[in-house]
Image (tube, helix red, strand yellow):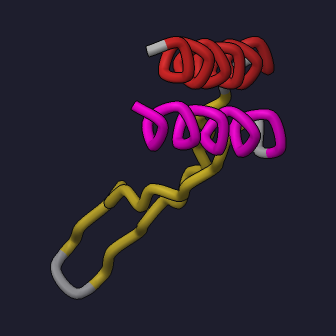
Amino acid sequence: MKQIGIFLIGIGVLALIYSGFQYTTKEKVVDLGPITIDKKEKKSIDWPPITGALLIIGGVVVLIMDKKR
């Protein structure tokens, strides 16, 4: 249980530092034999800062519960 608590705290800290990430997708728009036109589109996945705080709180709760046992 101690490892799970530490893991949750670590993930929570990372979630607070990095509030999301971006990635690029490549889409084929036109394909006329040897001529192709591609479109690159940036997309992002963001999460609210409360997510990181909840993960940290959950990790601390797991550590406290582990010490009581």
The answer to which image quadrant residue 57 occupies is: top right
Magenta stretch prevailing secondary structure = helix
**Residue 41 at what x, y percent from top left?**
56, 51
Residue 23 spot, x, y in % from top left: 55, 55
Q: Is residue 1 above or below residue 57?
A: below
Image point (58%, 41%), residue name: 6
Q: Nearer the viewer, residue 19 or 57?
A: 57
Side (left or right) of 1 relative to 16: left
Question: Which residue, as the protein is rendered here, is positioned at the far left?
Answer: 33
Dividing the picture into quadrants, the one containing residue 17 is top right
Q: Name the quadrant of the N terminus.
A: top left
Residue at 65% from the left image edge and 35% from the top image edge = 9
- Residue 44 vertical position relative to residue 22 in the rendered view, above or below: above
Residue 36 in the figure: left or right of residue 14: left
Judge left or right: residue 9 versus residue 66: right
Percent position (x, y) of residue 16?
80, 34
In magenta stretch: residue 68: no
- Which stretch did the figure color magenta? 1-17
